[in-house]
Image (cartoon, helix red, strand yellow):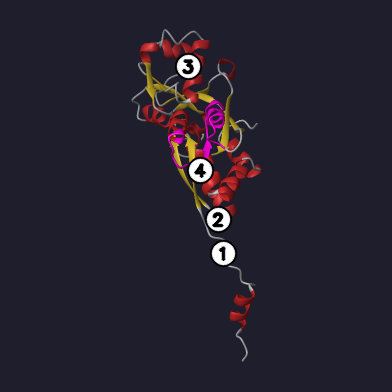
Amino acid sequence: MKIPAFIFLVLSGVLAPAVQAETIAVAVAANVQYVFEDLKIEFKKETGHDIRASFSSSGKFVTQIMNGAPFDVFLSADMEFPEKLHKEGFSVSPPQVYARGALVLWTLKDVDLRDWQSLLASTAIDKIAIANPKTAPYGREAMNSLQYYKLAAPLQAKLVFGESISQTNQYIHSRAADIGFTAKSVVLSAEMKGQGKWIDVPPASYQPIAQGAVILNYGKDHHPKISQQFFDFIYSAKSRAIFERYGYLLP
């Protein structure tokens, strides 16, 4: 009996089954939130796999991961937090820098930002939003910038702290705060571009925000291949172009 051509191809393995798509969980520093949607889309195009992302401050993620949170990969807003995880035995290898972030001062008020130091101290500004410097690296560096200009103490009563850059952005965008320090990637995002005014914070006034990524033990144990694929993708030319488009400096 002659076997139909389609059945023959299946039996012979010529028509191989499609690769089973998987989903990995990635803990993402809040400053990368807008960038990450583009990264996620390109990663799926390239591999067929999905990413379930959670966004928060890097410090909060460290606590969650050390308490057993099931994340495969961690994209931090600095190097210190992922280095802590590695030293404590929660990651496969030491963190690698995937981008360097930049600080901006952003407002929806109609004010002149050119002399922003005097502006912050003036009566035109009542509340200044900053991410929690204890858990959010961008908040920490915003405080370093204020200290550099000897403004931290004089402005203390005006400071309003968000739990993360995301909450800080909400304060600024909703006008709950008159002005605030945030990541440059936020004001360059499609969602926020053209809203309000912003100015670069002079990089000499704060430490470069080197951001590191690690594959976590959970990823090694549960999704080793996909976790490694995504980790490698973060450092690819395609990802680097995306980060650059959002105002990050490349390592």
Q: Quadrant of the C terminus?
A: top right
Q: How many marks?
A: 4
Distance from the alpha carbon under mark 4 to that under mark 1: 26 Å
Distance from the alpha carbon under mark 1 to that under mark 2: 10 Å
Q: Is residue 188 magenta?
A: no
Q: Amino acid at mark 1?
A: Ala
Among the two numbered marks 1 and 2 on one chain, the one whose residue lies closer to the N terminus: 1
Q: What residue range appears in magenta?
A: 65-91
Among the two numbered marks 4 and 1 on one chain, the one whose residue lies closer to the N terminus: 1
User: Which disc is residue 48 wearing?
Assistant: 2
Q: Amino acid at mark 2?
A: Gly
Classify mark 3: helix, strand or loop: helix
Which residue, given by chain and number where applicable, does mark 1 sit on?
18
Which residue, given by chain and number where applicable, does mark 3 sit on?
143
Which residue, given by chain and number where applicable, does mark 4 sit on?
218
Q: Amino acid at mark 4?
A: Tyr
Local packing at callout 3 (Cα closer than 10 Å; few below 14, some 14-19, many 20+) is: many
Q: Position of residue 15 (x, y in %)?
A: 61, 71
